[in-house]
Amino acid sequence: MSKGLVIVISAPSGGGKGTILKKLFESDDNLTLSVSATTRAPRPGEENGVQYYFVTKEEFSEMLEKGEILEHAEFCDNYYGTPKAPVVELTEKGKDVVLEIEVKGGAQIKKLIPDCVSIFITPVSLEVLEKRLRNRGTETEDAILKRLATAKVELKEAHNYDYIVVNDKLEDAVEDVKSILRAEKLRYIRNKENLDSSLGI
Ligand code: ADP
Ligand code: 5GP
């Protein structure tokens, strides 16, 4: 059985990662989301262990010290990190695992796992990004301004990613991500062992 893909998805806050991923998860049973640990407070409706593991700064440091975190970064005054064990276990079982993470974490994963598939989702413009972030209504004014300032820095990191998907029309962006994953699964290098064992090629 082939190992599952490690898929890094990054976008500036409000770029549409969550919305696009929700659609992908509805149509692909083999896809699983890596649940990150974060020190930020839960938003209304968010549950511990579902969107994130909500932890204190002390608990986060402890996880880091124990080597339980694959990558981590500080983002807008909070820490975020990917728990290592589930990523290893799920990909070994052939599951494709999505890491929905910001750009510093994305760079760490590309170094650690060079054959990961990295996708950067961009808005069509900063104006559209601001509008979407404000319409979402989940952040305070202060947090919106911080996230927009961070977005400008993050957009400059797009060149480090394998693929760019522009999130203009949602359905098109979802189809673009699906096409990327489909093509990645067909790469020779990911099918070599199966070819060897079944056809002796
Ligand atoms: P992220 O997870 O990257 O922070 P979200 O998925 O929460 O971003 O999207 C931010 C807001 O923009 C949400 O309110 C979402 O409904 C909206 N949105 C996302 N993609 C589109 C799109 N293609 N067209 C219109 N609105 C969108
Ligand atoms: P939010 O607070 O909006 O949920 O997330 C803020 C940012 O942190 C987003 O860009 C999100 O992708 C990123 N993020 C979430 N989990 C992780 C993680 O485990 N590691 C890193 N590096 N970034 C993360």
Image (spheres, helix red, strand yellow):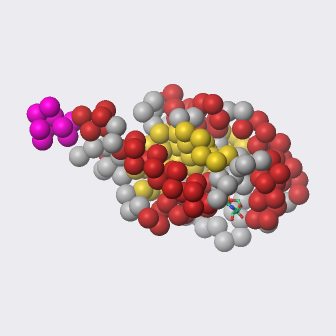
Q: Residue at x 40, y 44 (%)?
A: 183
| Residue 150 in the image, given as x and y percentages of width and height | 78, 41
Q: Residue at x 56, y 46 (%)?
A: 9
Question: Would residue 61 be seen by someone viewing this image from the given angle?
Answer: no
Q: Which residues are magenta?
A: 193-201
Spot the residue most to the bottom. 45
Q: Residue at x 37, y 57 (%)?
A: 30
**Near-viewer residue (185 or 83):** 185
Q: Is residue 82 above or below residue 159?
A: below
The verdict on residue 121 being magenta is no
**Near-viewer residue (19 or 111):** 19
Q: Residue at x 49, y 60 (%)?
A: 24
Q: Main secondary structure of the magenta part?
A: helix
Question: Would residue 145 be seen by someone viewing this image from the given angle?
Answer: yes
Q: Quadrant of residue 137?
A: bottom right
| Residue 69 in the image, given as x and y percentages of width and height | 53, 41
Please indicate whether residue 93 sits to the left or right of residue 113 in the image.
left
> If the image is split into quadrants, where does the C terminus sit?
top left
| Residue 161 in the image, given as x and y percentages of width and height | 57, 34
**Near-viewer residue (194 or 63):** 194
| Residue 68 in the image, given as x and y percentages of width and height | 50, 42
